[in-house]
Image (cartoon, rainbow, N blue to C red):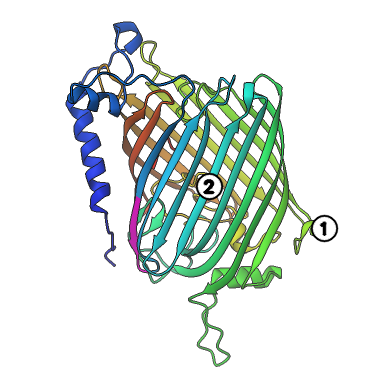
């Protein structure tokens, strides 16, 4: 089936304008701005130069705001449009950037997405706050459990924009639902770059409509993965929630959380959802995340290799279907470029990615590029499929346009290719 993709004219103009402006000033050789006397610039600097205007002096500690259009179309939601953005800033006395990001989207079929996320360092980095708040009236396909899903056949080629599907297939299992999330935690510094954190995580799916489900006693029935899983483990199929306490250890030595060029980030968290705080069943989960950044050039710090590894491990049958670990269900929704959100799902999931980042501009540092590869593995208890028995790789490339030099914020434009799957991504800041 051919995909239906709708691109906003304004979004295309934005991409063409930023790339063409940057390419005018970009050169084909690599130099270090520090060693050669070059100065890091952003797109605003180049525009002011082109208009013969003096450089704008930015006040110390002032924040930066970046807005990006969000566009797309798929059979379930219709045409989608909205705006996403981020605000980067520093608290007084702090040496680390903080970040607030969010998006608001609406579709022509009366569906809505509202997201607000925060990663904030307090004064002098004493406290570290992280949050993920969402409310969705939405629809999304599921594909079954494990990285060998779906059962019974092979999908046609899939296409997605920013992780949202733009095509449909006879083997997908579309669902409509409302979703509310409130995740918020606070870490306290016990040593330089070392935090102990405690938080609360609430997720609720309600008004669930399993569109392909057919329960016909006469024999013409169709049982979906969602219905089979939730019924087998005793969960409601129309609404459910988890209410969990989260304890976390964080080590963060990155020089910049928005666009790190050295250092690493480690998070090890325990998530306990107990009956006394509103859960049908007690569940325990272990969540591990690692990111590291390694320079490959002594002359240019923007020339590096970055690694990202995540593991999410839960007990079989202790969480409802839609709350299980899944593709692009990380806080920023940026994992598994090349696949649609929710493409792979399981009680246990491991994800890894490597990205090579390189400068393109000779002196300004405005234009750069990335090449990436990633892999996902998820289990399926019903088929006795374990982790690493089925692995789905993907890869791709992208361009970066520096839109704020003080925080090193890039506009990211990527295309990813998976197994019979292609995704296009337009976002503020790096993927990880």
Residue 386 screen position, x and y as percent? 60, 52
* Magenta run includes residue 408: no
Q: Which residue is mark 2?
A: 116
In this rendering, would 275 be left or right of 187?
Answer: right
| Circle 1 residues within 10 Å: few <14, some 14–19, many ≥20 | few
Labels 2 and 1 touching (C-beta < 8 A): no
Q: Which residue is mark 1?
A: 276
> How many marks overall?
2
Q: What span is colored magenta in the figure?
A: 70-75
Image point 48% across, 76% down: which residue? 212
Image point 32% across, 59% down: which residue? 157
The quadrant of the picture occupied by the N terminus is: bottom left
The prevailing secondary structure element of the residues shown in magenta is strand
* Magenta run includes residue 73: yes
Element carrying mark 1: helix
Residue 132 appears anywhere in the view: yes
- Image quadrant assignment for residue 171: bottom left
In this rendering, would 280 be left or right of 120?
Answer: right
Numbered label attached to residue 400: none
Image point 49% across, 49% down: which residue? 328
- Image quadrant assignment for residue 223: bottom right
Is residue 72 positioned above or below 312 on the image?
below
> Which of the two marks, 2 or 1, is nearer to us in this view?
2
Residue 425 screen position, x and y as percent? 36, 46
- First in residue order: circle 2 vs circle 1: 2
Residue 205 screen position, x and y as percent? 60, 64
Residue 421 appears anywhere in the view: no
Residue 79 screen position, x and y as percent? 33, 63
């Amino acid at each position: 089936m051919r995909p239906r993709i709708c691109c906003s004219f304004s979004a295309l103009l934005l991409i063409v304008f930023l790339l063409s402006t940057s390419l005018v000033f970009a050169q084909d050789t690599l130099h270090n701005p520090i060693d050669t006397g070059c100065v890091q610039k952003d797109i605003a600097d180049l525009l002011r130069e082109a208009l013969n205007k003096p450089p704008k002096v930015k006040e110390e500690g002032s924040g930066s705001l970046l807005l990006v259009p969000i566009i797309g179309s798929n059979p379930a939601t219709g045409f989608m449009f909205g705006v996403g953005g981020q605000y980067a800033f520093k608290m007084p006395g702090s040496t680390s950037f903080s970040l607030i990001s969010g998006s608001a989207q609406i579709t022509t079929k009366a569906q809505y997405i509202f997201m607000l996320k925060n990663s904030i360092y307090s004064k002098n980095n004493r406290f570290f706050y992280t949050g993920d708040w969402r409310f969705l009236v939405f629809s999304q396909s599921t594909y079954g459990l494990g990285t060998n899903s779906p059962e019974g056949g092979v999908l046609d080629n899939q296409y997605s924009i920013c992780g949202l599907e733009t095509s449909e297939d006879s083997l997908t299992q579309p669902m409509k639902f409302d979703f509310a999330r409130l995740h918020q935690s606070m870490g306290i510094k016990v040593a330089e770059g070392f935090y102990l954190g405690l938080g609360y995580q609430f997720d609720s799916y309600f008004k669930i409509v399993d569109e392909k489900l057919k329960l016909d006693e006469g024999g013409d029935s169709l049982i979906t993965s969602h219905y089979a899983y939730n019924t087998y483990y005793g969960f409601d199929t129309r609404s459910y929630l988890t209410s969990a306490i989260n304890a976390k250890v964080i080590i963060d030595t990155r020089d910049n959380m928005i666009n790190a060029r050295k250092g690493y980030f480690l998070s090890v968290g325990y998530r306990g959802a107990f009956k006394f705080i509103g859960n049908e069943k007690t569940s325990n989960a272990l969540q591990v995340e690692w990111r590291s950044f390694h320079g490959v050039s002594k002359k240019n710090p923007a020339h590096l290799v970055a690694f990202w590894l995540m593991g999410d491990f839960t007990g079989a049958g202790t969480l409802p279907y839609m709350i299980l670990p899944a593709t692009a269900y990380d806080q920023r929704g940026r994992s598994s470029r090349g696949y649609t959100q929710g493409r792979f799902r399981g009680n246990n999931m491991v994800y890894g990615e490597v990205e090579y980042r390189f400068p393109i501009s000779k002196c300004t540092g405005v234009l750069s590029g990335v090449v990436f590869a990633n892999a996902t593995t998820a289990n399926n208890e019903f088929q006795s499929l374990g982790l690493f028995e089925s692995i789905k790789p993907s890869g791709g490339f992208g361009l970066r346009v520096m839109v704020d030099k003080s925080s090193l914020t890039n506009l990211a434009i990527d295309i990813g290719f998976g197994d019979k799957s292609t995704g296009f991504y337009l976002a503020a800041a790096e993927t990880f």
